[in-house]
Amino acid sequence: MKKVVVFTGSGISAESGLKTFRDSDGLWENYKVEDVATPQAWQRNRKLVLDFYNLRRKQVLEAVPNEAHLALVALEKKFAVQVITQNVDDLHERAGSKKVLHLHGEIRKARSSVDPSLIYDIKGWELNEGEKCACGSQLRPHIVWFGEMVPELETAAHLISAADIFIVIGTSLQVYPAAGLIDYTKHDSEKYLVDPNAPTYVPGEFTIVRKKAGTGVPQLVNKLMKNTP
Ligand code: APR
């Protein structure tokens, strides 16, 4: 089986009703990154940070996977598929994708603010002040904030370097180090980028599908399935 690695960003969940970050009316138009998504923000104003992620979590729970998430599951019939996502929602998992690596954390989980190995599922949508880990420290959202290390980066680079087919969906590729992962592709791999606002040039000979994920991904998946016995 050929290996397919799919690298997704917030654009794949846009048609499920979740906002992207940098589009007009994206999340970072209404919030300042430094107020809600940095370790300094957590030190300064925990309640604001918790409230921001509580609202995001509520919206994720109300959202459902769309045609793009579902098409990637169908791809598993003929390919060994690994999803690597920058998204903190669980729509790939709920669609049925078997292998999903989250680079920037998972919004439905909390972790200890002193011991990163203590990770807990959040019941419902709220994580509040006073909720503590087994060793008594406040729980924080299980999210990789700006300025923090991306623990899964090396694993992701390794997976991408082994891919026969690499598909990028719905990311502006503006946030590093994640965006730099596209440099790890094999030079002879097939590469696709599905994004309605894809730039005219992406280094590395990508075939650009300038469509929304809900339309472009099922079309691409159909094409790949047809060309594979
Ligand atoms: N289908 C596909 N792509 C879409 C759609 C859609 N329906 N709607 C918007 N897009 C594209 C936009 O054109 C843009 O290129 O999704 C991309 C969204 O880019 P960003 O808002 O920058 O989001 P993303 O790339 O996921 O951000 C990366 O930034 O703030 C952080 O940690 C956060 O993981 C996130 C990271």
Image (cartoon, grey):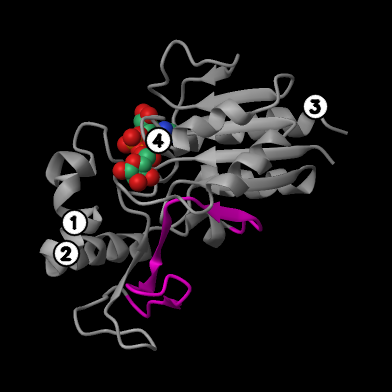
> What's the CA distance linking mark 3 and mark 4?
34 Å
Q: Report the disc number at residue 176.
A: 4
Determine the image quadrant of residue 24: top left
Structural crowding at the residue carrying mark 3, measured as other residues with C-alpha within 10 Å and reported as few (<14), some (14–19) or many (≥20): few
Callout 1–callout 2 Cβ contact below 8 Å = yes
Q: Are marks 3 and 1 in contact (CB under 8 Å)?
A: no
Answer few, some or many: residues within 10 Å of disc 4's Cα (few below 14, many 20 plus, some between 14 and 19): few
Residue segment shown in magenta: 96-124
Front disc: 4 or 2: 2
Query: Can you tell me whether the CB of the residue at mark 4 lies under 8 Å from the nearest atom of ligand 1?
Result: no
| Local SS, label 1 | helix
Disc 1 residue type (three-letter): Gln
Question: Viewer-proximal residue, 200 or 117?
Answer: 117
Residue at which label 3 appears? 227
Q: CA distance from mark 3 to mark 2?
A: 53 Å
> Residues under labels 4 and 2: Cα distance?
23 Å
The location of residue 69, given as percent across then percent down, is 54, 47
Q: Residue at (45%, 27%) from the top-left corner? A: 195
Q: Residue at x 57, y 26 (%)?
A: 183
Q: Which element type, helix, strand or loop, lies under badge 2?
A: helix
Q: Which residue is mark 2?
A: 43
